[in-house]
Amino acid sequence: MKVILLERVERLGGLGDVVQVKDGFARNFLLPRNKALRANSNNLKVFEGQRAEIESRNAKAREAASGAGEKLDGSTYVLIRQAGESGQLYGSVSGRDVADAVNAEGGKVDRSMVVLDKPIKTLGIHEIKVRLHPEVTVTVSINIARSPDEAERQARGENVITSQFEEDQAQAAEAAADLLEGGAGTHDLGVEG
């Protein structure tokens, strides 16, 4: 099906382009969301008559998104989640979780604006793209940790998984040393008696 794009659509084209798309994509996505019109002679005439209005409306939306994007770009949000010893989350962090975290801090982001290739399943700081407008994309950081203290340590650049592993090894070595010292002392007492 041929459609006229009413806004920039990634991997298809920009405003006013006439493109060929699959029927289902047009019927289920582009047309219901007012991102395109069917490319027939009547719609072409209507589009050309309203092109200036559509372009100005798109420019205003882009400017508003740019203004909001300046506030969001580079900001960091903390999510506290349960995770195993290896840093694997019990569950995952989805686009909805990211949108909720941004909105809780005063931003205005829809979950459909969050661009995640796959859900996040590990602790750490993750860079996530947020598409506020087809032409405006910003990056936010999500700090996923098990506690606020751990989130602060991650923010300073510490890898909490390896440091926890090292602490556990040090404690195990200390416990082994204490056990050896304690065992040698009781053995000596037994020989003297």
Image (cartoon, rainbow, N blue to C red):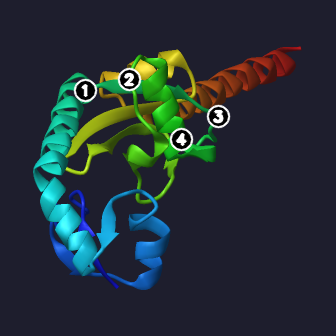
Q: Nearer the viewer, mark 4 or mark 3?
A: 4
Say whether marks 4 and 3 touch (CB < 8 Å).
Answer: no
Element class at badge 3: loop
Residue at point 26%, 44% (across, down): 133
Characterize the local packing of mark 2: few (<14), some (14-19) or many (20 or more) Cα atoms within 10 angstroms.
some
Whichever of labels 1 and 4 marks the residue nearer the N terminus, that label is 1
In the rendered structure, which amino acid carries the disc numbered 3?
Answer: Gln
Say whether marks 2 and 4 touch (CB < 8 Å).
Answer: no
Whichever of labels 1 and 3 marks the residue nearer the N terminus, that label is 1
Which residue bears the numbered disc 4? 96
Residue 94, position in %: x, y?
Answer: 53, 46
Q: Is residue 50 above or below residue 122?
A: below
- Taking the image as shown, residue 140 lies to the left or right of residue 54, namely right
Characterize the local packing of mark 3: few (<14), some (14-19) or many (20 or more) Cα atoms within 10 angstroms.
some
- Taking the image as shown, residue 182 lies to the left or right of residue 165, namely right
Residue at point 23%, 39% (across, down): 138
Residue at point 31%, 65% (across, down): 36
Element class at badge 1: helix
Location of the N terminus (image quadrant)? bottom left
Query: Looking at the image, which residue sits at the far left?
Result: 52
Q: Is residue 5 above or below residue 93?
A: below
Location of the C terminus (image quadrant)? top right
Q: Nearer the viewer, mark 1 or mark 3?
A: 1
Which residue bears the numbered disc 2? 107
**Toward which corner of the image does residue 158 lie, by quadrant?**
top left
Q: CA distance from mark 1 to mark 3?
A: 31 Å
Say whether marks 1 and 2 touch (CB < 8 Å).
Answer: yes
Q: Which mark is residue 82?
A: 3
Residue 50, position in %: x, y?
Answer: 17, 54
